[in-house]
Image (tube, rainbow, N blue to C red):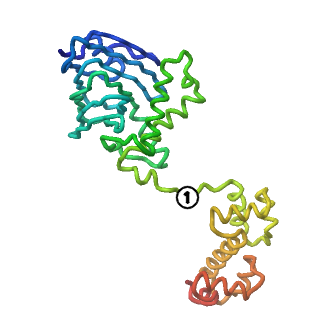
Amino acid sequence: MEYSPGTATPSLPWRFSTRTLDLDEAGEQGARTYYPLRLGVLRGAEQFMMSIDAMQLGPILVGNCRFDADITMDFAELHKFYHLNIPLSGHLTSKNLGNEVTATPQQAVLYGPTGDVRLSHWRARSRILCIKIRRDALEGELERLLQRPVRSPIDLAPSLDLTQGYGRILRELACMLAGQIGHEEPLTRQELIGTPLWHSMITHLLAAADHNYHDELLAPGPPCRPPVLDRVVEAMRAAPQTPFTAADLAEIAGVGIRTLQAAFRAHLDISPMAYLRNVRLERVHAELIAADPSGASVTEVAYRWGFTHLGRFARAYRQRYGVPPSRTLLSGS
């Protein structure tokens, strides 16, 4: 027995449930909920039944789907979507872009926007969470996380481990969303709750699945500097010649001296006064390189940028640049 797609049907409301014993109706409802498809029965036609309970959450459609017969399913390229199948029970075997995967409660299967999909065996009474994800949302989320453009489509691996790490959390999120479908007033309809949830689903999918941006995505990034630190750094760089004290810098930050020192150590691995000294050394070095040796002196330049103890200045300069400041003035390097 087989169903082939006919004419297009109206778009799906935000929540949708259907039960049918008719193969043609099942095909129509499956196409309406997901994609144009061709549905066939391998065995068990006399007990055929399809159930779908689906809910739209932003750019994600989550459907709890079951067939009471062994079926096959074919659909063409998804174009505008990525798709994730998470079995809650049973299994399904499918092939996309030459990759054949048997999805189980321990392993999900992923399809990208390209290549026809052939579900060669959806085992009878297997309950599958079928999750349709808008392509622009998944790729846009990855660009937001990486803070740069990405090449489309994302080259997602065809299978995903659901037993540990991000994959396990992804499965739990999907089950929680599926559990909201039957509620009269699901919490996910509240934007305050629903929006972070679908973002979390997409983020955990990107973290759990192997793809060409995976290592970059999970690489530790630089710590985010607190605003109090930025205020002090900006003040130092704007006027490093100012005779700042630790108390002055703490007042600019609006915190105590010890709190400011801890922030500098945590984010810049240096004390506030040492950071100020380095900024002053940078300005001295730049001025000495550009100066005319016949008309400039190291002492004048050092004083101008806030150094009052010439012996300590000379030692710090040599330690940082490897030569005495007079050598820089004479050679311009």
Whether residue 103 is visible, yes or no, is: yes
Q: Residue at x 77, y 64 (%)?
A: 258
Give the class, few, some or many, for how many residues have Cα within 10 Å of label 1's Cα (few <14, many ≥20).
Answer: few
- Measuring from the top left, give residue 67's x and y in whole percent: 30, 19
Nearer the observer, 164 or 10: 164
Label 1 sits on a secondary structure element that is: loop
Q: Label 1 sits on what residue type? A: Pro
Q: Is residue 21 above or below residue 239?
A: above
Task: Where is residue 277? Give x, y as percent.
Answer: 69, 75
Residue pointed to by mark 1: 222
Looking at the image, residue 237 lies above or below residue 53: below
Residue 330 horizontal side relative to residue 145, left or right: right
Quadrant of the drawing holding the N terminus: top left
| Number of marks drawn | 1
* Residue 277 versus residue 44 in the image, above or below: below
Front-most of residues 4 and 18: 18
Q: Nearer the viewer, residue 223 or 181?
A: 181
Q: Residue at x 20, y 18 (%)?
A: 41
